[in-house]
Structure formats: structure tokens, C-alpha cells
Image: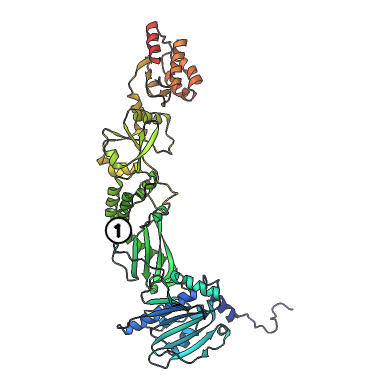
Amino acid sequence: MAQGTATPGNSWPPEFRLDRTRILNLLTGKSFYSDPSAALREAILNAIDAVFRRRKVDPALDPLVTVTFDRQTLTLSVDDNGIGMNQDDVVGLFTTVGASLAQVEENPASVGEFGIGVISYFMAGEQFVLQTDSGDSSPIGLQFTKEMLAGNRAIELTPQRTSQGTTVVIHVRDKDTFDLLVDMFPYWCRDVTVLTAHLEPDGKPLQQGGAPRFERFQPPQEPKWVENAHLAPVSDPTGWNSMTGRSTISVLYRGVFVQECQLPGLWGIQGSIDVDPKHFEPRLNRESFIGERFESNVISFMQSCHPRILELLVEQLGDALERGVLDEWTTGRWANLWLSVPRTQPYAAATRAWDSQFRTVPAFELADMGNRWRAVSLEEIKRRSGRVYVAPLADERATDIVQEAVRFLRNAGKTVIRGIRHDQSWMRYAAPVYGTTADLIWNVFAEELPTLVTVANEAEGILGAIESVSPLFTGPPRVDLVRLGPDSQPAIGLDGRLLINIDHEAGKALVRDALEVNKGPLSLVESAARHAHQQTMHVVRVVRGMPREAEVFGPVRRQYVEKLLS
């Protein structure tokens, strides 16, 4: 065929040809909706829309939506006493994909523009029946089949309605789909105040999923797009254990679930909000909202609620503490929670409440005898007299000098504490104000405590003040014999002093070698390489600055030192 010649039967230039049947089947398939239960949600939302549209013109109306699952006939019926429809409404709403009564209303109050309409009913069945009465025209009865997606017409039925409203009966495809619809009813219907539901043939009432009522929390002034807010602090200790530092709330339309919304950094919240869908742009399948505007609006509202939520949460934590519910919590877990409390002005009251409660919570560690650390509270630290020494964190690589200063202070009965780092494995989405509880003490509670001293900054001075049992070499620098306990290092080199710990066997060996060789301080280097190789550089650093002339021991001096070692 010559280039530029169209195939017979095709037009040129080319044009789009839409396969209407395939497109409509796509819109009613699993690739578009999450599962067939979307038909249930759609039918209920349409009924809610209808009753509230009628009440807009008839405020005395008592809205009612009744959902009936019939296991014998495999049908789902949704009946309402709403606005109803005339022929023009049915033609416009049911035969134009994406159309809705909301599009032709002035200042609409319906959810109609929230989705693509009733073709989702074909997700659950091959046909459905419509019975409707608008109150100002003849009632209508119609049967819609899936063949209509290929262009077939609806089938007229004898009208059954005797009062204003609409009834939709979906003939469910099979038993499995029917069971799915029943199971998903409480998932979609959380808190629809105008709705009742039951299962036939035994008339068993079906309970909605529930949007729990919380009496203690009153949200701040709600924006117009928030129709209801059922929010509270997480009250179940199991929920506290699984907190990630963000919350998840359910977003509803007049009690019907639409989607979940993640709230990064806003931890400890549970519940749901009902929103006006006209304030946001919905997705075509009505299963969520589009764009950053929705998320930013929801997060902004929840940010205004979060300070009060945290106030109530710490009260519940206090109650749980008294009951012993949280006895198994680790020091790290308490520290993580406390460090995650925001300290900006909106949280001032919440911060005071948390600080008050956590004064008695073990969120710090105290150096104990035997190189052990035990959990302590702020109040216990405050009760201790004298200076409070703040040691490096457990996971920090402290120098030998700093570690030895901590040991000395601990063995001397001084108050040595260390903080706990915020752990990203729990509350990982919370942004801590302070990285450790030691930072918290310095920045928030320093004025309440005795003088705080950072061991890392003062280690040389702390060790330099250790009293000598006896000088070994007079220096300068001096080599002093000290008693630091068997768990301290055998030798510690400071800028102007070498300490040899004669409570340590290796320290004693250094002294015995020095006495036996009797060639002055330089002999300590070779001895350290044999008995305390990890401290060799400490020894070298000090003795290399000492006089080259050997300082030898006389008989009396030797006898005195040997007695110290015995």
C-alpha cells in the first residue's frame, strides 16, 4: 500500500473511537473500585443525600434510611423517605454517567457530585430495581440491567411506592458477594444517625461500625467543613504500645466511611471526623479525596485539637500507672514518650501536665554500685543532696578519662545520672524537642535541681582532685598511689598526674615492678606493657615529661610502699 493511503473503511485523518461498553465495564470493575461492597456504600450515600435534600425544604421531616439484607432472595434493599425523583430526575441521574442532582441544584446540599453514580451497583449484581416517588408526580418503577451498559433501555415496572422517597433493590450476584456486603456493612456505616439495618429472614438487627462518643474532649471551634468530630486520646494501653508517633483517623460523610487520614507527628489521637465533601475534590470512585488541600485542611484542624488531646492522654497514663497497667514499660519507653511532647506555646498547658506527671516516672538512670544503672525519676534526683553529675549516654563512646571519672564519682557516693536517647524504633514519626532526657533536664529543670555538672567537661578536674594514698614518684608530674576500687582502671594519665590504682591487681603489679627494678619512672612504661597494656599510653604520656634522672627508693620508702600493697 502506498504511503499516506488509509485502509478501506477507516477515515483519514484518524479520530478517537471510544468503546462505550468496555469503558463502562471498566468503571464497574475491580480495577476501579476496591471491591463489590462499594455498591453498598454508594446506595447508602445516595439515600442519605436524598433525605437531607428533602429535609432542607421540609425541616419537620424525620429522616429515615432502612437497609435490608435478605439472604433467601439474595437482595440488598436501601429504602429512604427522601426527596424522591420524577422522570426528568431519573433520566438525568441514571442515564448520564457522572451526572447528579447536585449539578442542577443551586447551592446544593447533597453528596451527588461526590461520585459517578449508580453504575457502581453493577459491582454487586447484574440488575437492580428502582422504585421512587417525588411527591409531585406519578411514582416510578424501573428495572436496570447490566446490558444497559451496551445501550439497552431500562424496563418499566409497576410502581410500588405509596409515599415520597426511593427504594433501590440490588439483586446480588451470588452468595459470596452477598456475604461480603453483610460483612462490610459495619465497615462502611460507622455512625449514620438516620439509618437502621437488619438481616432477613430472621430480622436480625445489624450494628454499625461505630464512631465512639467521647464526652471529655471538646474540639476547638470547628471549621464549616467539619460537620462532626468524635475525637479522644488513645485510651487502650495496647494502643499506647503500638504508637508510632502519628495517628490515623477515619474521615466520614454523615457517618459513612470514606477514607483514613494519616496525621504525622500528631500522636495519641483516635476517632473520626465527618466532613462536607463539597469542600474538597473527591475521586471519581468516591473512595477518597484528591489533592493537598484536603490533607492540609484536616491536619490543620487536628493540630488545633492535639494539645488538648495530649492533656487528656497524660491523665489516662497517670490512671494506668496507679493501676499497674504499665509496670512492664522500660525506662526508654517512658523517655521516648516524654521527649515527644511538643513545647510550643499552644502546648503550654499540655506540657505542664506531662511534666507534672512525669516527675515520678523513671525516665532517667542513676549510677549504682557495681557498675550498674537503675531507673530513677526526676523527683528522686531532686531529693539527693550535693551536685548532680550528668554522665554520657549509654550508647556514647566516652573516653577512658570520662569513664573513670564516672566510676570514681559513683564509688564516692556522688549523684551521677544519665539521660535516655529518643529511640526511633518506637514513636518514630514523632519529632522530639530534645534528643535525650539529659537535654530535658538541662533545658527545663536545671533551676529545680542542685548544681548540674557535665562529667565529660569536668573529668580531668574530677580525677585531679582525688586524694593520694602516697606518692610513688614526686615528679613533676607526680605519680600517685590511689584507691579507686577493683573495678576502676589500674592506671589513669592526667595532664599533670599519673594515678596508679592499688585496689587493682594490675596496678599493684606496676608498683611491685617499680620497686624491684628501682630505676625511676621510666620503668613503668615496660611494666605497663606487660601488666596493663591498655593503659600504656596513659603511662607514657605522663612519664615522658618527668626528669631524666632516676628517682630511686630508699629502704624506708620501699618498706612503706610494700606495706600499702599488702
Q: Position of residue 187 (x, y in %)?
A: 45, 69
Considering depth in this image, is 184 or 565 the residue closer to the camera? Answer: 184
Question: Badge 1: how crowded within 10 Å, few (<14), some, or many (20+)?
Answer: many
Q: Position of residue 543 (x, y in %)?
A: 43, 18
Position of the N terminus, as image quadrant, is bottom right
The residue identified by callout 1 is 308
Marker count (numbered):
1
Q: Where is residue 341 in the image (x, y as percent from the top left)?
A: 34, 51
Q: In this view, does 6 lie above or below 260?
A: below
Q: Is residue 443 above or below residue 508?
A: below
Considering depth in this image, is 269 or 2 the residue closer to the camera? Answer: 269
Q: Which residue lies furthest to the right in this view?
A: 1
Q: Specify how the rendered protein is coloured.
A: rainbow
Amino acid type of the residue tagged 1 in the rendering: Arg
Determine if residue 519 is in view.
no
Q: Judging from the image, what secondary structure is the residue with disc 1 in?
A: helix
Determine if residue 374 is in view.
yes
Position of the C terminus, as image quadrant, is top left
Q: Position of residue 333 (x, y in %)?
A: 39, 47
Q: Is residue 78 above or below residue 493?
A: below
